[in-house]
Image (cartoon, grey):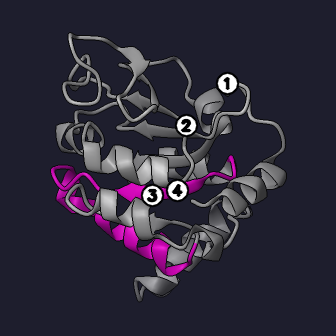
């Protein structure tokens, strides 16, 4: 996300709750399940470099039942701190609601669960969806691909996440307009080749 995208994202959604003054926040969520591969992909210098290149100054990671603290971005079991590259990092397990985190974020990296994706899209953040292949027949991959086909988000895997953040055209994403479940469900059905 370049600085222009950051400004555009801010205009589309208004003030961001809980964001440090002047911060461009990236928020990562694994949801309520374990997704250690996603946690490992964000606890990586290549992901940090991609965020910094996009102008992100603060990273918040909701790791769920995964590792309680990063091992590469921060050391010594710290859950808050600043990386050697200057990125502010906050690591947490769960919160009662993620709505304030989505509202504060300019970029959301999320497992591809429907609830998290639609909440992030409704908050007007740029979204990168990372399917968890270990869940229910890999249905998250189908949802991520369908929504990427609608140009409302970018889909990635844990192996391609850093590159996707570094190279994605977030300016080319279409703002998600909630129109009730019927509209998006119909669009996903049409992309999947299903008839009503």
Name above or below for residue 90 compared with residue 28: above
Q: Which residue is mark 3?
A: 128
Q: Which residue is mark 2?
A: 57
Q: Nearer the viewer, mark 2 or mark 4?
A: 2
Q: Whole-Å distance between the Cαs marked 2 and 4?
A: 17 Å
* Residue 74 coordinates in the image, percent (x, y): 28, 22
Q: Earlier in the sequence, mark 1 or mark 4?
A: 1
Q: Nearer the viewer, mark 1 or mark 3?
A: 1
Q: Nearer the viewer, mark 2 or mark 3?
A: 2
* Crowd class of label 3 (few under 14; some 14 to 19; many from 20; radius 10 Å): many
Q: Which residue is mark 4?
A: 127
Q: State whether residue 114 appears in this view.
A: no
In front of the other: 157 or 76: 76
* Crowd class of label 4 (few under 14; some 14 to 19; many from 20; radius 10 Å): many
The residue positioned 65% from the left and 67% from the top of the image is: 182
Q: Whole-Å distance between the Cαs marked 4 and 3?
A: 4 Å
Q: Which mark is residue 20?
A: 1
Secondary structure beneath label 1: loop
Q: Earlier in the sequence, mark 2 or mark 4?
A: 2
Q: Whole-Å distance between the Cαs marked 1 and 3?
A: 22 Å
Q: Would you say the residues marked 1 and 2 are in contact, meaning their CB atoms lie under 8 Å apart?
A: yes
Q: Would you say the residues marked 1 and 3 are in contact, meaning their CB atoms lie under 8 Å apart?
A: no
Q: Which residues are magenta?
A: 123-151
Question: Count of labels shown?
Answer: 4
| The N terminus sits in image quarter | bottom right
The residue positioned 26% from the left and 63% from the top of the image is: 160
The residue positioned 15% from the left and 50% from the top of the image is: 134
């Amino acid at each position: 996300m370049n600085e222009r995208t950051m400004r555009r994202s801010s205009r589309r959604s208004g003030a961001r709750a809980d964001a440090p003054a002047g911060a461009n926040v990236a928020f990562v969520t694994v949801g309520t399940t374990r997704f250690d591969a996603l946690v490992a992909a964000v606890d990586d210098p290549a992901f940090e470099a991609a965020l910094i290149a996009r102008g992100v100054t603060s990273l918040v990671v909701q790791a769920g039942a995964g590792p309680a603290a990063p091992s590469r971005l921060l050391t010594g079991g710290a859950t808050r701190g600043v990386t050697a590259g200057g990125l502010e990092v906050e690591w947490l397990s769960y919160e009662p609601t993620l709505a304030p985190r989505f509202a504060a974020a300019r970029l959301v990296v999320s497992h591809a669960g429907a609830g998290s994706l639609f909440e992030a899209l409704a908050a007007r953040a740029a979204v990168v969806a990372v399917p968890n292949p270990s869940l229910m027949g890999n249905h998250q991959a189908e949802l991520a691909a369908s929504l990427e086909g609608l140009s409302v988000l970018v889909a990635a895997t844990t192996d391609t996440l850093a590159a996707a953040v570094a190279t994605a055209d977030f300016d080319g994403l279409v703002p998600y307009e909630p129109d009730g479940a019927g509209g998006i469900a119909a669009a996903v059905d049409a992309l999947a080749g299903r008839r009503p």
